[in-house]
Amino acid sequence: MLLWRRLCVAIVVIGTVVANLHTAESGGGRPHRILLDTDVDTDDFFALLYLLKLNRSEFDLQAVTVNTNAWTNAGHAVNQVYDILYMMGRDDIAVGVGGEGGILEDGTIQPDVGGYLPIIDQGIGTAGYCRYRQAIPVGQGGRLDIDSNYGFRKSFLPQGRRKYSPLRQPTAQQVMIDKVSAGPITVFIIGAHTNFAIFLMKNPHLKKNVEHIYVMGGGVRSKNPTGCCPQNASSSCQPRQCGDRGNLFTVYTSNPYAEFNIFGDPFAAYQVIHSGIPVTLVPLDATNTIPINEKFFEAFEQSQHTYEAQYCFKSLKMARDTWFDDQFYTSYFMWDSFTSGVATSIMSISNDRTGENEFAEMEFINITVVTSNRPYGVSDGSNPFFDGLKTSKFNLKKGGVHSGHVQARLRDPFCIVKNGKGRCKDGYTMEVSGPEAVPVLVATKAKPNRDSKSSLNREFFRSFLDVLNHPQHTGKFNFTTQFPYYREVLYKPDFGGKKLGKNVVFDMDMSAGDFLALFYLLKLPVEVINLKAILVSPTGWANAATIDVIYDLLHMMGRDDIPVGLGDVFGMNQSDSVFSGVGDCKYLKAIPHGSGGLLDSDTLYGLARDLPRSPRRYTAENSVKFGAPRDTDHPELRQPLALEIWESVLKSLDSESKITILTNGPLTNLAKIILSDKNTTSLIQDVYIVGGHINYDDNTEKGNVFTVPSNEYAEFNMFLDPLAAKTVFDSGLDITLVPLGIQRKVSAFPKILEKLHWTKKTPEALFTRHLLSRLHSLQRKHHRYQHMDTFLGEILGAVILGGDHSITNSAFKVKRISVTATGVEYEDGNMKIDEKNGKSVRILENLDPMTYYALFANRLGDEQQSAVVGSFEEQRRTWSSPPK
């Protein structure tokens, strides 16, 4: 019976497709051109895949632009989009992300603003504060899981030729301008509105080409069904978000009105809604009526006949299995995919202005978007559009709707009402009358399934499963079926008979220099250095999901035996006291989001995908044993935490052995180790710290925190977590410091590249040369890359740890050092000589740069302990031919 039903559905759909194709071919109408602006959250790629499966003679997806200030980080998001499009055979679709333009104080919008920051905080760079984004969890259950798609992105999606590449990647604004200029187009916005608002403000002459805007976001008359006490609950049950207009589950005590997509940039959403272009809104009012229920989940589990359906179900299942409580089926909704369905159904009935469609009930409602809170016109330091300016930015009206208090942080005191709901309404899509009112077509409720006998209680459930599973326009392959002879191999060396050297743990923040240092450590003879583990600090130059690049590099070098532990995603005292998954970015705001910053670090400047693909990767798999609410399918694949790896390393030591630690990033992990158990410090032989800038009394050389001009003398690794740095330097550990001054002496790109040119061409030497050449080229081409030589200096710690002091003529001095951690931005992370209160530290003060360059290059060219698989291209060739 089930087979017959599917056959009938297939016949009906195929018949419809043929009819539509006939109409298009006979001149019956042009396809609807669509531009999708997305934050690439899980439900976003559900929406993307739904669109890609529709009849192309009716719906022509022209471009995808990535919203970079919400649930994903730009580098991971854009490469996932490329891979999804490759799987679906749609490399013709343009993809735009980022941009390095800024907004001047007078409101002038430069070309190619990247959308990394909300418009209210956008200056001339891509570094800045996380005013609204701090409401989104950073680690598990948040951006880490979305960036990696719970670990499925790299294990499932095939890898094509398109990828992010610095200065070559089309920007979001370029793609929008190109596609809108080409003719009438419909825009879908299923993330924050920053990209499209900037487009409209910069290019008002192109508005005429935008036929309609479909938005998933906001809550007009919605009542949040989550966080409610069951009817039979005891009096001790305290409702949380129950009945709120919004869904900000991390910040509802200060703002119960906003929904995440609109809250991500309220001023941008205001510009879109008030643009004069017809808008259809699919808010929480409607999506709250289409939760993922058990019947749909079970039907989806049985309907995975295409790669795209499999990818969506795997993601949905992992979201369910890792959900923080037992209310998944009443808390997870079809947000963006439902919007795609409603929008395309409306568009297919082109002459119906009432929004008649298959999936949702519609109503015109007069709304606006709240961008600031009453009283208006009062300057309190929260509103950069007005505060400290003679003329408001964009000539906004003083005393107008944009001139009030703007929510500044999670627990903004202005927003907190004692014993009551929060009073801030930033991002609220509020029903209003009067001059601020805009008539918007609003979806108010999901329609029931027309087949009352079906187990699927919503009409869109049926459509979603039918469309994803239809064989037309289906995915070509996944990662494993992309290659006819794919096989997973783990490479673990056999050191039997060798006397292993100094036990080392490497703590890295995954900057470009850290990966070069890791290559060097892996090339040192194991009789000299025994690399026991790697700890990752995601509080520095790269986001947590970039841990996969470490796994790939280790795989390349045949060291799949080395464990990797993920550290805390917040620096000390930076996580929220109420909801630990979110927190402040007081120091991390100094790292640029775009070029030369997180975008490039997360992709290793576009070269990460050249590394061979490791079977090991981050996954969201979890276990009750480690505090999870339930076991997932493969708890053995759970990503270990940094402290867990540290403890396992200690247990593996012989009774007389100790550990040497090399740190190349913020000192968060090491501080947590010290604080976790005072006795463990006795097992630490010594610590090599790359970072810090010693502020001598007569010092004229500045630090390198170039995005925080008020702090002249700090170095990034100390600034990014000053409290951790102070904890480490006050601990009494035997510390060798490799400070910024000496790093700057070994930062000549031409000289190190020359040495690498003459060394033997091992895969690791070739990759290193390629990366350094790219950094050097970028530094010469664009001002955003002026700090690239910083990463050259980061290799130095590994070389010094290797013990080649006599060769490099290294000179050390012992001085008493203290680190400032007062919470004051202009002095945090500063390091100074303090004979009275400082701790003794051995400081590297001199070495021979040319000998150092030669030593590094020669070690990388050594054929001993060389790569076992040189690149992804080598893997591609291997997996494309039968094994010999």
Image: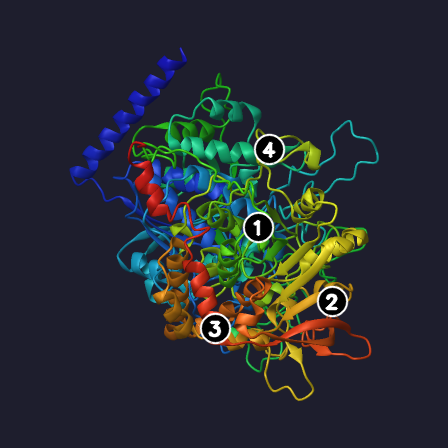
The quarter of the picture where residue 404 lies is bottom right
Q: Is residue 605 visible?
A: no
- Work out how far the residue at label 1 is from the one at label 4, CA to CA, in angstroms: 33 Å
In terms of secondary structure, where does tag 4 sit? helix
Q: Nearer the viewer, mark 1 or mark 4?
A: 4
Q: Is residue 142 visible?
A: yes
Earlier residue among tags 1 and 4: 1
Earlier residue among tags 3 and 4: 4
- Work out how far the residue at label 2 is from the one at label 3, CA to CA, in angstroms: 30 Å
Residue ID for mark 4: 636
Residue ID for mark 1: 260
Residue 272 screen position, x and y as percent: 46, 58
Residue ID for mark 2: 729
Q: Please tell me which residue is depicted at 23% across the width and 44% down the height of the picture.
A: 30
- Work out how far the residue at label 2 is from the one at label 1, CA to CA, in angstroms: 40 Å
Is 383 placed above or below 62 here? below
Amino acid type, residue under disc 1 in the picture: Phe
Residue 288 screen position, x and y as percent: 57, 37
Amino acid type, residue under disc 3 in the picture: Thr
- Work out how far the residue at label 3 is from the one at label 1, CA to CA, in angstroms: 54 Å
The quarter of the picture where residue 379 lies is bottom right
Earlier residue among tags 2 and 1: 1
Amino acid type, residue under disc 4 in the picture: Glu
